[in-house]
């Protein structure tokens, strides 16, 4: 139950939500929609808010995500979650790690932002395969892929937030 989130003052609720999606507009909209009776309601509100974001808001959210294969710095909740989400990519062998690093750079040159994927439960090889596929996307297709991945990550993180993980 999102009772703790519901009880927070707006600024504190927004700060908590920013760990799930680092778009200030998203966090403000989701916080303003409280109270939420169930996690599913919160996740639905999060998805709706995410779908309405301008691309600049999505880029703001992407700014909080480390490159795939790079360890998130810091001891905070968001960094801890990111390290857990990327556990499969973090255990890559040397060749795969090198290919991920090269792929990240190629992706950033092509699209102008970090490669984002919901890496939870995926091996480094699976992430690398998806990176290679998405390098072939046109800009519009890739923006939609980024939004879908950000939505998946946000949904998982909202569950973690409510679950106290």
Image (cartoon, rainbow, N blue to C red):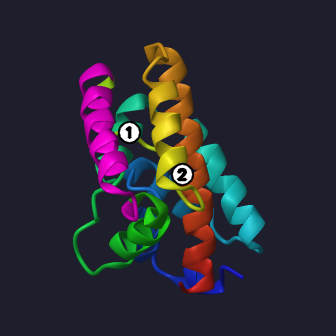
Residue 94 colored magenta?
yes
- Secondary structure category for the residue under label 1: loop
User: Which residue occupies 56% across, 27% down?
Assistant: 144
User: Which residue occupies 45% across, 29% down?
Assistant: 132
Q: Say if 135 sits above or below 25 in the image.
A: above
The residue sitting at the top extreme is: 138
x, y percent for residue 70:
28, 57
The answer to whether residue 11 is seen in the rendering is no
In this view of the protein, which residue sits in the foreground, 129 or 144?
A: 129
Residue 115: which disc? 1
Q: Provide the residue span drawn in magenta.
A: 90-110
x, y percent for residue 42:
68, 64
Q: Say if 69 sits above or below 126 in the image.
A: below
Q: Is residue 73 left or right of residue 107?
A: left
Residue 87 colored magenta?
no
User: Which residue occupies 46% across, 71% down?
Assistant: 84
Residue at mark 2: 118
Q: Is residue 154 left or right of residue 131?
A: right
Q: How many C-alpha atoms fall within 10 Å of the one at disc 2: few (<14), some, or many (≥20)?
A: many
The answer to whether residue 143 is seen in the rendering is yes
Q: Say if 34 sits above or below 114 in the image.
A: below
C-alpha span from label 1 to label 2: 10 Å
- Secondary structure category for the residue under label 2: loop
- State yes or no: discs 1 and 2 in contact (Cβ < 8 Å): no
Dividing the picture into quadrants, the one containing residue 40 is: bottom right
Q: Say if 148 sits above or below 158 in the image.
A: above
């Amino acid at each position: 139950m999102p009772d703790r989130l519901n009880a927070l003052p707006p600024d504190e609720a927004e700060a908590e939500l920013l760990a799930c999606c680092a778009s200030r507009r998203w966090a403000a909209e989701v916080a303003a929609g409280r109270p939420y009776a169930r996690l599913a309601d919160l996740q639905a509100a999060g998805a709706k808010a995410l779908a309405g974001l301008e691309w600049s808001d999505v880029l703001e959210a992407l700014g909080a995500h480390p490159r795939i294969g790079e360890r998130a710095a810091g001891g905070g909740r968001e960094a801890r979650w990111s390290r857990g989400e990327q556990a499969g990519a973090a255990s890559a062998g040397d060749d795969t790690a090198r290919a991920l690093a090269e792929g990240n750079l190629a992706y950033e040159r092509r699209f102008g932002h970090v490669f984002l994927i919901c890496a939870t439960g995926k091996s480094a090889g699976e992430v690398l395969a998806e990176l290679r596929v998405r390098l072939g996307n046109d800009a519009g297709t890739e923006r939609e892929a980024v939004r879908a991945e950000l939505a998946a990550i946000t949904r998982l993180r909202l569950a973690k937030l409510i679950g106290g993980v």
